[in-house]
Amino acid sequence: MAITALHTAATGMQALSTKIDVIANNIANADTVGYKSSRANFQDLLYQVWAQPGVQTSAKTSSPLGTQIGLGVALSNTQILFRQGSAMQTGNGLDAMIQGDGFFQVELPGGGTGFTRAGNFVRNSEGELVLGNSQGMRMKDSPTIPEDVPLDKVSISADGQVVVSRADGTAESVGQLELARFPNPSGLLQYGSNIYVISPASGDPIEGIPGQDGLGTLLPGSLELSTTEAVSELVELIKTQRVFQMNSQSIQTADEALQTVANLRR
């Protein structure tokens, strides 16, 4: 039994170590625009069945319970929690926050399309909208903003239109932004740099204009904050640490039991 306890507690320590990694990443991204926190999900392992429940014990009776010994725990997956983040007003006309379902679409450096909840866009040297991350990914089908229009005269409307205000007081739409949503957004692959990419689990993107076909609307001049709740993550970190220590104590207890058995031979 002590040998089984050693291996069982070891699986617990390994799984909880991974959970601590997930929590640490959530806390590290507490100030990352558009970040969605993740959680670690677990599942129990196979069981040693020493006695089946319901076994006939006599002509008229059967055992109501069995004897089943679990062999530990394993990480089943990590799940992205797509909750709505809080809004932070920036006053920047090129900033936009998605209220509801959907992702902005950007072009990946190696080809293909990436998806992001971060709406911190900037105008590049060619007048196109690019994501304000380390790679400056260009927005898919980006409109071109005229060079003679200052940035404080550019805005994004709730339905995704990029509008510029002319010197004569007239407003002109220079492009239309589209969003994309997925049947299972938690199945997206995390690419890094605030980007997700599609996977067989996420399904194909459903594109459309903000506010239509189940897509959220845009909140101009705002950004979506990280969904990491620092207090909750710290509480979960403390709880995980305590459970990790209890698994360590189980290993120590099993080791002492084995040592006692070994000493009986002397």
Image (cartoon, rainbow, N blue to C red):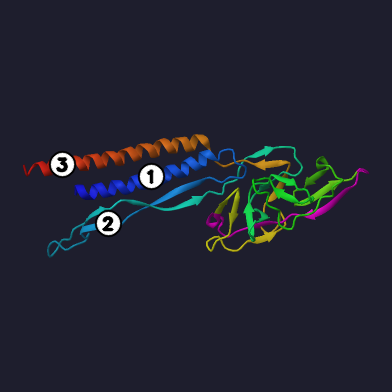
Position in image of residue 122 (x %, y %)? 73, 45
Q: Where's residue 117, x and y in %?
A: 63, 49
- SS assignment at label 1: helix
Q: Quadrant of residue 261?
A: top left
Mark before the other along the chain sequence, 3 or 1: 1
Relative vertical location of residue 27 with respect to residue 189 in this rendering, above or below: above
Residue position for label 3: 259
The numbered disc on residue 16 is 1
| Picture coordinates of residue 211, whole percent (x, y) | 71, 54
Magenta includes 185? yes
| Left or right placement of residue 162 versus residue 19 in this view | right
Q: Relative to 54, is 183 on the left or the right?
A: right
**Circle 3 SS class:** helix
> What is the magenta range?
167-189
Q: If you read the primary sequence from the N terminus, does the residue marked by circle 1 or circle 2 appear first? A: 1
Amino acid carrying label 1: it is: Leu
CA gap between label 1 and label 2 equals 20 Å
Q: Earlier in the sequence, mark 2 or mark 3?
A: 2
Count of numbered labels shown in the rendering = 3
The reply to whether the C-beta atoms of the residues labelled 2 and 3 are less than 8 Å apart is no
Q: Can you tell which of label 3 and label 1 is closer to the viewer? A: 3
> Alpha carbon of mark 3 to alpha carbon of mark 1: how far?
27 Å
Which residue was labeled with disc 2?
47
The answer to whether any part of residue 101 appears in the image is no
Task: Tell me if label 1 and label 2 are in contact, CB under 8 Å.
Answer: no
Q: Which residue type does callout 3 highlight?
A: Gln
| Along the viewing direction, whichever of 27 and 181 lies nearer the viewer | 27
Q: How crowded is mark 1: few (under 14 residues within 10 Å), some or many (20 or more)?
A: many
